[in-house]
Amino acid sequence: MSEKPGNSDESDTDVLLGGIFGNNDYEEPVIKGHLVKFYTMLGMPIDIHLIGKSPLYGHILTNACKYIAKYLEENMDTLVKDRTVIEFGSGGALPSILCAKLGASMALATDYPDPELVNNIEYNIKMNKVQNNCKSLGFIWGNDISDILSLISGPPVERKTFDTIILSDVIFNHTEHYKLLKTCKQLITPKTGRVLVAFTPHRPHLLDADLSFFQKAQEQPYNFKLDFIEMVHYSPLFKDDKDESTREIRSRVYMYILYT
């Protein structure tokens, strides 16, 4: 039975990936985890391998990630086709790979430069056959952006900024808000570029701290403008959390857009 568009199916079987990348900057020989099959609204399957465990949610296909994938597909003409796209905190890199399949001129999936995370992103890119217009890179928010720009400054892309920046379930890291905003400001295309921010309050008692990201974004020196798109509900992500008093909050996905 096929999944409904926008849904995903997780395999219970562990997958071992070793020796598949050849020579690269990372030496991790084995990645252990599981495979998720995601279906777009049009029924196109995308296979995403997720690592076994990560404190940064890199081992989970989150509801915010699924939501932002749907939003990108619905708005592909203005956000994706022939656009430069970068994703921070990519995890399995579903949004980046989707953008590549939908015709982005370049989709760059970045995450913390942990060998397992970045090798796994590269594996997903190759598995989905989007190597021509999708790349992976380890990057720490707030650091020098030269390596990022080098991937879009030459032919055939020849750009200096990104039209679409994707932030999916990353603003829970409250101490890094300013660094993330700095990088977004440096990379966004002035006026026409958009920063898509989707998140779930996985720690309900820290919702105000999550939301503080948007107040910071409007302050100097960032001066982003802000549109609240919507708040929708999914099933709570962590099934072992039995606290019924926070169930509704944990089921939320918020969507905002930042622009200059």
Image (cartoon, rainbow, N blue to C red):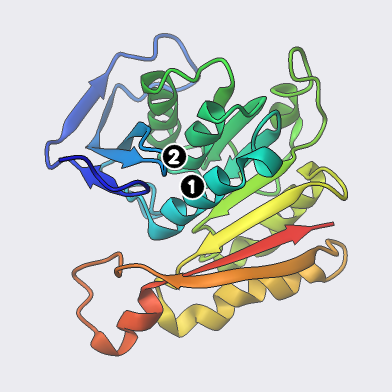
Residue furthest top in the image = 22
Residue occupying image coordinates x 65% and y 76%: 212
Q: Position of residue 206 (x, y in %)?
A: 49, 80
**Which residue in the structure is indicated by mark 2?**
94
Can you see residue 96? yes
Quarter of the figure with residue 127: top left
User: Element type at marker 1?
Assistant: helix
| Position of 112 relative to 256 (above/below) | above
Q: Position of residue 74 (x, y in %)?
A: 56, 48
Q: Amino acid at mark 2?
A: Leu
Residue furthest bottom in the image = 245
| Position of 70 relative to 93 (above/below) | below
Q: Position of residue 66 (x, y in %)?
A: 42, 52
Left or right: 170, with 220 as reference point: left
Q: Within 10 Å of the Cα at label 2, are there few (<14), some (14-19), or many (20+) other Cα atoms?
A: many
Residue occupying image coordinates x 51% and y 66%: 172
Left or right: 63, with 152 as reference point: left
Q: Give the Cα separation between the discs numbered 1 and 2.
A: 7 Å
Q: Within 10 Å of the Cα at label 1, are there few (<14), some (14-19), or many (20+) other Cα atoms?
A: many
What label does residue 69 carry, if any? 1
Residue furthest left in the image = 13
Q: Earlier in the sequence, mark 1 or mark 2?
A: 1
Q: Position of residue 126 (x, y in %)?
A: 41, 19
Residue occupying image coordinates x 80% and y 36%: 161
| Position of 151 relative to 226 (above/below) | above
